[in-house]
Amino acid sequence: MSKFQLKNFFKAAYDPMLVFLQFFIISLHFFQWEFLAQKQIIQASPFSYLLGILIIIIAFIIILVSIKDLGRNLSPFPRPTKNSNLVTTGIYRFMRHPMYYSLIFISIGVFLIKLTIYFLFLTISLALIIKFKIALEEKYLMNKFKNYLLYKNEVKV
């Protein structure tokens, strides 16, 4: 395989790789791996538990509203679908990428409930993957929608 072919392979694999990693890290939140240390950073308290639950509930509601507002434009991939429209109404009037940020906040909520190094690692990993995914998605959106830059400048978050 030539250097050019290898570069094109990695470029084509980048989108699905980000989606896979995102879902993989999310799925790790549901498993307790016995061989990984479940060392708590600090002792969990009722306050951290309740704060974690509250953050998860609010983030989950934002995800549901985002799904409703996106409608047929919903896709797990950063590249917009062929017949998609730029959604700037509903929750997207106040923030860009509310589903991505909500996933990070759900991970933060789980971390606050557990307060372990494992869940801190998952939260940081998920935030990094989503950061890369947002950067890629915004590049695609700017190429597809002429008014995306104006939207991006108006809606900062």
Image (cartoon, rainbow, N blue to C red):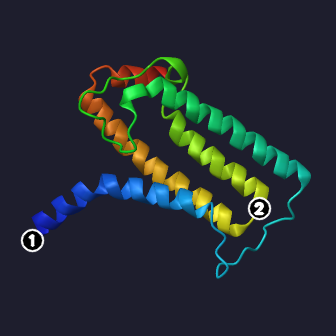
Which quadrant of the view contains residue 77? top left
Q: Position of residue 94 (x, y in %)?
A: 55, 22
Question: What's under tag 1, amino acid-wise?
Answer: Ser
Q: Is residue 37 above or below residue 117?
A: below
Q: Is residue 124 above or below residue 99?
A: below
Question: What's under tag 2, amino acid-wise?
Answer: Leu
Q: Is residue 73 left or right of residue 51?
A: left
Q: Is residue 10 left or right of residue 1?
A: right
Q: Position of residue 12 (x, y in %)?
A: 22, 55
Seen from the viewer's position, the closer of residues 154 and 74 is 74
Q: Point out the image quarter for the C terminus.
A: top right
User: Which mark is first along the chain, 1 or 2?
Assistant: 1
Q: Secondary structure at mark 1?
A: loop
Residue at position x 31%, y 38% from top? 139
Q: Is residue 91 left or right of residue 7?
A: right
Kindly give the residue lying farthest to the top in the view shown.
89
Q: Point out the image quarter for the N terminus.
A: bottom left
Kindly give the residue lying farthest to the bottom in the view shown.
35
Q: Position of residue 14 (x, y in %)?
A: 30, 56
Which quadrant of the view contains residue 120? bottom right
Question: How packed is label 1: few (under 14 Cα within 10 Å), some, or many (20 or more)?
Answer: few
Asked whether residue 156 appears in the rendered view, the answer is no
Give the spatial CA distance, label 2 vs label 1: 47 Å
Residue at position x 66%, y 68% from top? 118
Question: How packed is label 2: few (under 14 Cα within 10 Å), some, or many (20 or more)?
Answer: many
Mark sitting on residue 115: 2
Which residue lies under the disc numbered 1? Answer: 2
Q: Nearer the viewer, mark 2 or mark 1?
A: 2
